[in-house]
Amino acid sequence: MSKQTKKKLVPKLRFPEFQDAGEWVIKPLCEIGDILQGYGFPEKYQGKTQGKYPFYKVSDISNAILNGSHFIEKAVNYIDKDDLALLRAKTIPVGTTVFAKIGEAIRSNRRALTTAECLIDNNVAGVKAIRGKANDLYIFYVLSQINLIEYSGGAVPSVNKTTLENIPVFSTEPKEQQKIADCLSSVDELITTQAQKVDALKAHKKGLMQQLFPAEGEGETDPKLRFPEFRGAGEWEEKQLERFATFAKGKGISKSDISLNGVLPCIRYGELYTHYNETIDTVISYTNVSSDELVLSKANDVIIPASGETQEDIATASCVLKSGIALGGDLNIIRTKMNGVFLSYYLNNAKNKDIAQLAQGISVVHLYSSQLKKLNINIPELPEQKKIADCLSSVDVLITAQTQKLDALKAHKKGLMQQLFPAIDEVGA
């Protein structure tokens, strides 16, 4: 019987100049990067917003990532050179990959590269590339593939320096590392630019809604911005919502009722928080529960959760654009002759605080149709409602398109990383 041929440790995708290069190797992290420790943050420096050295904490790393960057540039707290001497602390250099090493933050797998000489908190660790063995960007991308929670222990997840030093990582010649890092970094730049486009469109939409709806919290009954054809029209009319609508309640559709092969489209209340915006044209869930046992939508229905975790969350309205969709329990249904798309945008912007104040409860808050009926609203005539709805819907179409481009870039990067590094399951082969 012939011996099984050992599979070579090489990535599926390699740049042309490295096609004939040798195999990759697996090394402990400490052979390509220095593990750098942090310091307990002194309370007397809390809130010191100026100084020579940023003092990064886990929250600073999270904020950088949430702002769409893998470079960390701002800290909440700073210290000066004299403070550094008093602490007897050493700074870490530019280009260090920093990340949480203790607590639930480990699960987020967030990494950031430092852009200035700095200090890090003792809940943070850093890895700086060893010259001649690796480069900083390569270290960053290698670490982004490692899930530290798999190496953590204790009641509170944590990893110590020894554990970090011995984590197995892929390594190849520095020139190939640099090529990979440059490639992935260029994709990250595209992702960052695309994320900025999405954020700009969302900010534009928010600004539009503030202009197109009255600032009712400031006592206004008319919007600041009206389309030319409606500038000579009368004031918006204030009445209670029950003057324009009837109310109903959805009927229970449990998680177990959801089926991939279901024939009846349905909406569950939790999906309003996670999947839908102001309009619902295509649904994500289906059920085989008989329609006779459920409440079905009529086109133009506006739905609002009847329960939620916070008062702010519950003020979430969506307009169902199609009839015949099953509406689950814990959904308030507003059936109106108004333009439902206009109403959903209006409720989510001009009236969100008022709706939040109506909700009752502590651990779980509830919102009842009897409360929604008494909600005072200011509305224009139907033609103006439609114009506003069409305007905001068109912006949402742009946001959706640009978000899809962003998701495609992220998927492209993920695929690239899977191709540019050897398969994880080959560790130890």
Image: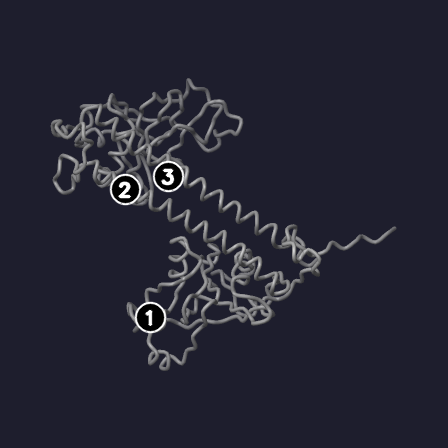
Q: Secondary structure at mark 2?
A: helix
Find residue 356 and report its image quarter.
top left
Residue that mark 2 sits on = 206
Residue that mark 3 sits on = 399
Q: Secondary structure at mark 1?
A: strand
Q: Is residue 189 left or right of residue 295?
A: right
Colour scheme = one colour
Find residue 271 and report its image quarter.
top left
Find residue 18 and report its image quarter.
bottom right
* In the foreground, 114 or 345: 114
Q: Is 57 above or below relative to 385?
A: below
Q: Along the polypeptide, which appears first: circle 2 or circle 3?
A: 2
Q: Is residue 261 left or right of residue 94?
A: right
Residue 376, image x, y percentages: 17, 32
Disc 2 versus disc 3: distance between alpha carbons?
12 Å
Residue 133, image x, y percentages: 60, 69
What's the residue type where badge 1 is placed?
Tyr
- Residue at point 53%, 49% (across, down): 413
Residue that mark 1 sits on = 78
- Residue at point 60%, 65% (across, down): 174
What's the residue type where badge 2 is placed?
Lys
Disc 1 versus disc 3: distance between alpha carbons?
37 Å
Residue 282, image x, y percentages: 42, 28
